[in-house]
Image: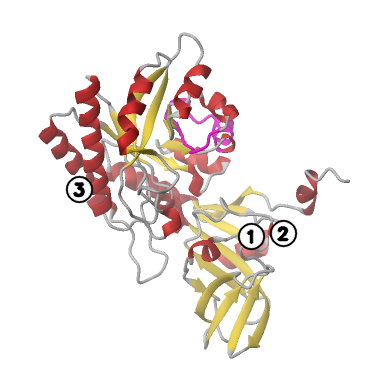
């Protein structure tokens, strides 16, 4: 794709997503996991166009808020293929979620709340999210499978939660769920989680004489952000994890469940880039700072997680510089040690692997307008989310 032309046509900052790459990655998952339900984790990046691509490619969709559910429904995403998540679902969200394929119960209080909202004569399929006690993930803030964090039901309380679900005629226990973390690049933690979760299937079968038909192992599949990094080996994952589940089930004499996985970052991250323009170049304290027209409002990940990126200033080279954003924070740094010592105002800056958790986590900090999203398919670029305008920022402000 001609990024310079896209920058001229749509302005900067701008998110650019390769639709062909997204669709190809969806197909990679279905090919690697032919007997597994693949549910795209919408929290990574969700627009009406993205939801449509996912639906057309045959994936299910994991949503985690009323807003994401509303967007999915706006494009006619099949209700039966929606999984609704959230550790603190509001009463309104629970009410709206009734009727989707699966609601993931994160705490025992949700069991009775959800059951009370199901219309007479209907049953809502649910998963119980379990904390398997496994620590994995690229940063402490995204490790979600260990004890002492906010997600899931502890193993010690799972039996009680199962009993509560089974006592509710409005609910059907369709599966157990876990999500051990994000940006995991080794298959081993998923294998360990699979063993723990199959053990819980055996516990439910033994104590309640109930067979749980599905096992959702969540997502967290890591990607390479830098040239010297590697992502999760999907081929290895696709053979190793189902094998572990099958062997553990045979050993414990448990019927093998239908597996579900929820990749988000791994589907869309590498398909995206972010474009900026250089606004100023400043040499201070022995360093060169190249300031651009975006920053932590469109990419908070460096400040939150210390995330690192491959960044280029096309046509420029030389001494290393620090690419910084425009916001009122000293920590608004996009990348260090970028070879662009001869950068000039007006130059294009390209940040790679920004398809996940950039548009999704964007804000209007400093009342800056959020960037547009441009999709490219077959070499043709089109706008799928327009640039925010000052009028958008003022619309909710009701005055004095």
Q: Work out whether mark 2 precedes mark 3 in sequence or the reverse, and give the earlier one.
A: 3
Query: Badge 1: few (under 14), some or many (20 or more) residues near its Cα, within 10 Å?
Result: many
- The span shown in magenta is 68-89
Q: Work out whether mark 3 precedes mark 1 in sequence or the reverse, and give the earlier one.
A: 3
Q: Is residue 45 above or below residue 95?
A: below
Q: Are marks 3 and 1 in contact (CB under 8 Å)?
A: no
Q: Is residue 224 above or below residue 108?
A: below
Q: Work out whether mark 2 precedes mark 1 in sequence or the reverse, and give the earlier one.
A: 1
Indicate which disc residue 368 carries. Answer: 2
Q: According to the image, what is the colour scheme of the structure?
A: secondary structure
Query: Badge 2: few (under 14), some or many (20 or more) residues near its Cα, within 10 Å?
Result: some
Horizontal and vertical percent position of residue 2? 55, 64
Can residue 342 be seen here? The reply is no
154 sits left or right of 242 in the view: right
Indicate which disc residue 297 carries. Answer: 1
SS state under label 3: helix
Q: Are marks 2 and 1 in contact (CB under 8 Å)?
A: yes
Residue that carries the numbered disc 3 in the rendered image: 240
In this view, the residue in front, 136 or 147, is 147
Q: Residue at x 61, y 69 (%)?
A: 332
């Amino acid at each position: 794709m001609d990024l310079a032309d896209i920058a001229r046509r749509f302005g900067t900052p701008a998110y650019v997503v390769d639709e062909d790459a997204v669709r190809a990655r969806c197909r990679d998952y279905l090919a690697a996991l032919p007997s597994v339900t693949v549910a795209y984790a919408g929290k990574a990046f969700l627009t009406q166009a993205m939801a449509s691509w996912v639906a057309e490619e045959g994936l299910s969709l994991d949503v985690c808020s009323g807003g994401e559910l509303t967007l999915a429904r706006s494009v006619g995403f099949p209700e039966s293929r929606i999984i609704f998540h959230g550790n603190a679902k509001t009463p309104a969200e629970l009410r709206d979620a009734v009727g989707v394929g699966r609601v993931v119960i994160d705490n025992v209080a949700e069991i009775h709340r959800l059951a009370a909202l199901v219309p007479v004569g209907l049953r809502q399929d649910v998963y119980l999210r379990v904390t398997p006690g496994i620590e994995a993930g690229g940063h402490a803030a995204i490790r979600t499978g260990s004890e002492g964090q906010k997600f899931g039901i502890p193993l010690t309380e799972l039996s009680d939660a199962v009993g509560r679900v089974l006592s509710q005629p409005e609910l059907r226990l369709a599966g157990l769920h876990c999500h051990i973390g994000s940006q995991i690049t080794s298959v081993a933690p998923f294998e360990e989680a699979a063993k723990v979760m199959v053990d819980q299937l055996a516990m439910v079968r033994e104590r309640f004489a109930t067979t749980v038909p599905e096992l959702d192992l969540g997502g967290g599949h890591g990607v390479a952000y830098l040239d010297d990094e590697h992502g999760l080996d999907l081929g290895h994952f696709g053979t190793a994890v189902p094998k572990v589940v099958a062997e553990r089930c045979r050993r414990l004499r448990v019927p093998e469940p239908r597996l579900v996985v929820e990749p988000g970052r791994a589907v869309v991250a590498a398909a995206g880039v972010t474009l900026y323009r250089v606004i100023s170049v400043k040499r201070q304290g022995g360093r060169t700072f190249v300031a651009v027209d975006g920053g932590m409002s469109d990419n908070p990940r460096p400040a939150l997680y210390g995330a690192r990126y491959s960044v280029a200033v096309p046509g420029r080279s030389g001494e290393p510089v620090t690419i910084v954003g425009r916001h009122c924070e000293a920590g608004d740094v996009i990348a260090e040690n970028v070879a662009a010592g001869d950068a000039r105002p007006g130059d294009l800056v390209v940040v790679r692997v920004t398809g996940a958790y950039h548009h999704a986590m964007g804000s209007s900090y400093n009342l800056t307008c959020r960037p547009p999203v441009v999709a490219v398919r077959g070499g043709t670029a089109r706008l799928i989310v327009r640039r925010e305008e000052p009028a958008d920022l003022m619309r909710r402000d009701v005055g004095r």
